[in-house]
Image: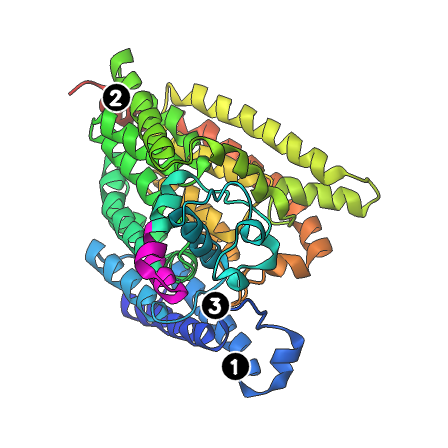
Amino acid sequence: MPGPRLVRYLGLAGSLFLAGAAWLGGASSPWEPTVTPRTILAGREGVLLPLCWLLGTALLIGAWWAGRRAVPSLRWAYVTAGLWALPLLPFLPLGSYDVYSYACQGWQQAAGLNPYAGGVDLLGCPWADAVAPTWRTSPAPYGPVFLVLAAIAAKLGGSLTGTVALLRLIAVLGVVALGWCLPRLARRAGVPPERAVWLVLACPLVPIHLVSGAHNEAVMVALMAGGLTAAVARRPLLAGILLGLAVGVKATAVVVLPFVVLLFPGLPRKAMVAGGAAGALAAVSFGSGLGLGWVSGLAGSGVSVQWTAPPTAIGMTLELFGVPGAVAVTRVLGMIALAGVLIVLWLRARHGDPLRAAGLALAATVLLAPVFHPWYALWPLAVLAVTVRRDTRWLVVPPAVAAALCLPDGYNLALATKAQGAIVMTLLAGYLAWKVLNEAKSYSRRPGADHGDADRHRRVP
C-alpha cells in the first residue's frame, strides 16, 4: 500500500500531465476536435496529447484509489485535493465544451433574451463558434439559478476568456463550499470526515470536470450538500431554501427533497422545508424574468444517445439484435422503474436513515435516467461518501471508470464504442441495479446504532 506522500505526488504528477493535455488540446475556441487520427499522426504534439491524457488520467485514478484506505488527516486530504486541482486552473477546459454553452446562455440572459426559447443558432451569441455543434440548436437545459450566475459571469467577464474564467471561479467556490459541508455530514453519520473528503474532493472527476471543465454540478452539489448540512443542524427553512436553489441549477436535486423532509418531526417543520424550497425557486424563477420556462427546456438534454446510460444501453443492445425503436421504449421503462425505486426508498427511509436514502435515490437517478455524462457520478458520491461506513469500493469504481471516458477536447469515448459499450453496459446494468437495491434494503436493517443515530437526529432538540 503506497504511503501518503507517494499517493499525494503520484496524483500531482497525474494532474501535471493533464495540465499538459489541456495546454496541447483542451476544449478550444472555436470548436475543433483535437484528438483524431490526423492530429495524432501529424507530429510531436499530436502524439504527446493522448499520452499526457492517458498518463495523467491513470495516475490520478490510481492515486485516488490507493489513498482511500488510509487518509492521515482531514488537513492532508484538503491539501492534497487542492494540489491536484491547482495545475489545471490556468489552461483550457478539459473533457467538455459545456462551459462555452454556459457562457453563451449567460450572455443571452444578460442581453435580455430568453435562453429557453432556442439555442445559439436562433438567439445568437458572439461566441457561438465555441459551442459544440450538438448543442447549438438546444435551449438551455438548466434552471434559472445557474442562468443568473452565468449572466453575471458574462456581464462582468466581457469577453469569452473573462466569462470562462469567472464560470471556473464559481465552480471552484462551489467545490470549496462542498468541502466545508462534507466533514459536518460525515460526523453526523459516524463516518471518518477525512475519508469522506478524500472520496469526494480527490475524485478525479472533481479536478477534471468541476475545476477544469467548470461544470455547474459544482454549484448544484454544493447547494445540495449545504441543504443537507442545514437539515442535520435542525434548520428546516434554510435547508429548504438551499435545496430549492440546488433544484434551480439542475432539476435532479429535487429527488433529495422528500428525504430531507423526513429528517424533521412534525408537520410545521416539514412544511418549512417544502415552503423554503418552493419559495426560493419561485423567487429566482420570476425575479430573473424567466418564469417556469426552464421546465420545458429539460427535454433537450435527451438529445444524446450513449451507452453510458443503462436504459439507453439496453435499448441500443436490443436494436443491435433487430428490435427497432427500442431505445425510446427502454428509456421510458427506465423512468418508470426510477419512480418505483424512489417510492420504495422513501418508504424505507421513514424507518431508516433518510440521508443515506437520499444518496441512494441520486444513485438510482444516475442509473435509470435516459442520459449519463461522467460528471453525473458526483451527485450520489457526494452524499454516499458521508453515509457509507464500510466497503467503499462500489463508490469508487463507477467514478473511476467515468473519469476515463472523455478525451481532452470533450469527445466521449462512448461514441466510438457504441456496439461494444452497449452490450457491456447491458450486462453491467443488472449488477449495478442489484447493488443499489441491495444497499437500499440493508441500510434500514443495520444494527441499532444506525437507526438510533437516525432517530436521534429526527428528535426536536
Q: Residue at x 53, y 67 (%)?
A: 409
Q: How crowded is the residue under tag 3: few (<14 C-alpha within 10 Å), some, or many (20+)?
A: some
Q: Nearer the viewer, mark 1 or mark 3?
A: 1
Q: Residue 361: x, y in percent?
A: 46, 32
The chief SS type of the magenta part is: helix
- Region rendered in magenta: 152-167
Q: How crowded is the residue under tag 1: few (<14 C-alpha within 10 Å), some, or many (20+)?
A: some
Q: Type of residue at label 2? A: Arg
Which residue is at the far bottom?
Answer: 44
* Label 1 vs 3, first from the N-terminus: 1
Q: Residue 97: x, y in percent?
A: 50, 60
Give the number of the disc on residue 58.
3
What residue would you read off at disc 1?
A: 48
Picture quadrant of residue 92: bottom left
Q: Residue at x 56, y 59 (%)?
A: 132
CB-based contact (under 8 Å), mark 2 and mark 1? no
Q: Type of residue at label 1? A: Leu
Q: In the image, is 434 to the left or to the right of 155? A: right
Q: Type of residue at label 3? A: Ala
Give the Cα distance between marks 2 and 1: 55 Å
* Label 2 vs 1, first from the N-terminus: 1
Q: How crowded is the residue under tag 2: few (<14 C-alpha within 10 Å), some, or many (20+)?
A: some
* Element on which disc 3 rests: helix
Q: Nearer the viewer, mark 2 or mark 1?
A: 1
The answer, for residue 192, to whether it is visible in the render is no
Image height check: is 373 above or below 264? below
What residue would you read off at disc 2?
A: 458
Which residue is at the far front?
Answer: 112
CB-based contact (under 8 Å), mark 1 and mark 3? no
* Element on which disc 1 rests: helix
